Amino acid sequence: MKRFVIVGTQWGDEGKGKITDFLAQKADVVVRFQGGNNAGHTVVFNNKKHSLHLLPSGILNPNIMNVLANGMVINPKALIEELEKVKNFKLMISDRAHVVLPYHLELDKAGENSKGGKKIGTTHKGIGPTYTDKASRIGMRMSTFISKSLMPKALLDLINKKNQELKEFKVKPLSYKKILKEYQNYANIIRQYVKDTSIYLNQAIEDDLIILFEGAQGVMLCLDHGTYPYVTSSSPSAASVPLNTGIAPWLVDGAIGVTKAYTTRVGEGPMPSEIKGELADRIRKVGNEFGTTTGRPRRIGWLDTVILKHTKRVSGLTYLAVTLLDVLTGIERIKIVTGYKLNGKIIDSIPAEIEDLKKCIPITIETPGWQEDITKVSSYKELPEQAKTYLKLIESIVGVPISMFSVGPDRNQTIVIKNMVGEA
Ligand code: IMP
């Protein structure tokens, strides 16, 4: 595959960053195509741990071009904070990407607080309100944001309008003057990177470059195919890449679906495979299951193959990458969810109605766990038989070959079974 997508197959946090970082070593271009700084993963550079939220994983490699494509919503302040930590990078920002402005953050918080028991549990980064403005055709694109002549008036109109909305939530009005001054400074820094990235990407395809499209979040958080309304406001699926980057659909070669060896979720909403108590606490602790963006403890569940089959169907998955396999070490019997019972009937797909999904009781199979430390294995062969059986079960139930798995955070703890990038 020369142009491939990294897809989160669950509710995000599958370890996509690590897989992307690993595969980016072979890429010429890394592209983020949706979401904004609601995403996050930790990378180590200059001997320091840094959280990347907006920047693509190729940003640490001076030879890789990093693209923030038109499907993204970009908070300029957050972007500049991230850029200040990196040196020698290549970056391009789409002139059609939408800009997250301070009122989006205020409206996100206020909207959530007003929902009481029905809140989504958003990251409060203003993502939903920015995409809402895009769909309402009142958003600000990068092309306007960097325009010295157009931006001041556009911002004034928007702040006047949004201050009215904030008033309804009893939130203090925002100061136009203050925001203008601050955001003009950001625009001055960002301007040099803003381009028509579709033109660049189509040329890169003609030049036969290897392009990695880096998804954020996971397909269960997709606005269309996720657990609506407990979703984000964009589509993390492979199917969203062409639209959100400006290339033809048939130019994408395939998708690598990243799945944890178990399931996690942050925020509200049903999660049929959820487990609680001592075992969940142990997995949370060993897997360090706390949000990179918000620090919230993640909810824990068994691997749910109903979800993986759903993701395979709606997004397309050429291969699977299984992460955090080591976290399951020491568990005597490992469960896998293979279906749900809903109103007395057995189903193996995700109901559209959230009230139905809440009622789904998981159907599971069990397989023996392993006790050996697997964090140092360097090949599939070295895995204990039980771990091999677990991977084979996933492969056969989901019907997608596993191309790689990981047993720890380091690059050398990611093990390739089948080399899929750059192959004919
Ligand atoms: P928003 O994207 O901030 O609007 O949040 C909507 C939902 O998506 C909430 O349940 C968030 O917790 C979830 N979410 C957003 N980004 C991520 C992510 O990167 N990982 C996991 N969950 C996320």
Image: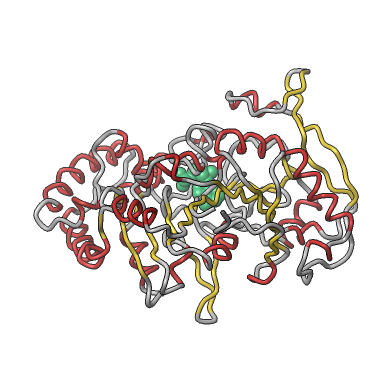
Scheme of colours in the image:
secondary structure
Residue 324, image quadrant: bottom right
Which residue corresponds to the image point at 90% horizontal and 50% vertical from the top-left? 368
Task: Identify whether 185 is placed above or below 112.
Answer: below
Residue 191 in picture, x, y percent from top left: 22, 63
Left or right, 354 with reference to 197: right
Task: Identify whether 46 is placed above or below 361.
Answer: below
Residue 58 in picture, x, y percent from top left: 46, 66
Front residue of 24 and 101? 24
Q: Residue furthest left?
A: 149
Front residue of 386 and 364? 386
Q: Which residue lies furthest to the top in this view?
A: 344
Image quadrant containing the C terminus? bottom right
Residue 171 in picture, x, y percent from top left: 31, 45
Q: Residue furthest front?
A: 424
Residue 163 in picture, x, y percent from top left: 23, 43
Residue 379, image quadrant: bottom right
Which residue corresponds to the image point at 69% horizontal and 47% vertical from the top-left? 263
Left or right, 320 with reference to 143: right
Which residue corresponds to the image point at 67% horizontal and 72% vertical from the top-left? 412
Left or right, 250 with reference to 384: left
Left or right, 229 with reference to 344: left
The total of numbered circles placed on residues is: 0
Which residue corresponds to the image point at 15% horizontal and 47% vertical from the top-left? 154
